[in-house]
Amino acid sequence: IDRVARVVENERAAAPNAVLVAAGNLFFSEPRVEERMVYQERAKAEALTGILTGLRLAAFAPGPADFALGPEAWRRLSSSVSAPALAANAGMASVRLLDAGGGAKVGVVGVSDFRPAVGDVAQGAPEAADPVEAARAAVASARAQGATAVVVLASTPRRAARSIASSVEGVDFVIAAR
């Protein structure tokens, strides 16, 4: 964590308007946590919320493992981070507009797919609609709100992220993770 904090600090010194965003599993690495590991995994996730707030995380698109301890733990953890969870296709916020300085506004859009590459969906993970169509609507919303650039955080399989990048009008960057 110290090395990551140093990198973020150095980038912000070089580019004061730089922001930190995340896509993919943020709190847990697997969609299921063994019973004997629940206390430790919960403690790590809770510590991470403070670290991410200190790093000034601007927005994140949650991943399939973020619901590993169920919906109540998800609500508690995600609300403890000072950044919104963005998943336009899963009933979460869809856009965060950031002031980039000089009149520029960056629209950050998020979409997620909560099906893990292997195994079952975490208990309590929300149903997610088509990420490409949700990205299309969220990007249009970001542009309508005055975004001069739009970044899509895609916590989706690579195929969906590529489809967003190639077929959704108004996307400037896609940050994809799985």
Image (cartoon, rainbow, N blue to C red):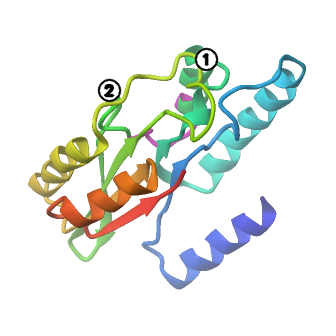
Horizontal side of residue 178 vs 134, given as left or right: right
Q: Is residue 146 magenta?
A: no
Question: Residue 95 location, x and y as percent?
Answer: 28, 46
Q: Residues within 10 Å of mark 1 (few under 14, many from 20)?
A: some
Residue drawn at 54 percent across, 32 percent down? 78
Which amino acid, mark 1?
Answer: Gly
Front residue of this view, candidates 104 and 154 = 154
**Position above or below: 25 against 129:** below
Asked which secondary structure carries label 2, the reply is: loop
Residues in magenta?
A: 79-86
On the rendered image, what quadrant is the N terminus found in?
bottom right
Q: Are marks 2 and 1 in contact (CB under 8 Å)?
A: no
Q: Main secondary structure of the magenta part?
A: loop
Which amino acid, mark 2?
Answer: Gly
* Residue 107 figure quarter: bottom left
Q: Residue beneath label 1, please?
A: 70
From where the camera sits, is residue 112 visible?
Answer: yes
From where the camera sits, is residue 107 visible?
Answer: no
**Position above or below: 43 against 54:** above
Residue drawn at 59 percent across, 25 percent down? 120
Q: Is residue 80 magenta?
A: yes
Residue drawn at 60 percent across, 47 percent down? 53
Q: Residue beneath label 2, please?
A: 91
Asked which secondary structure carries label 1, the reply is: loop
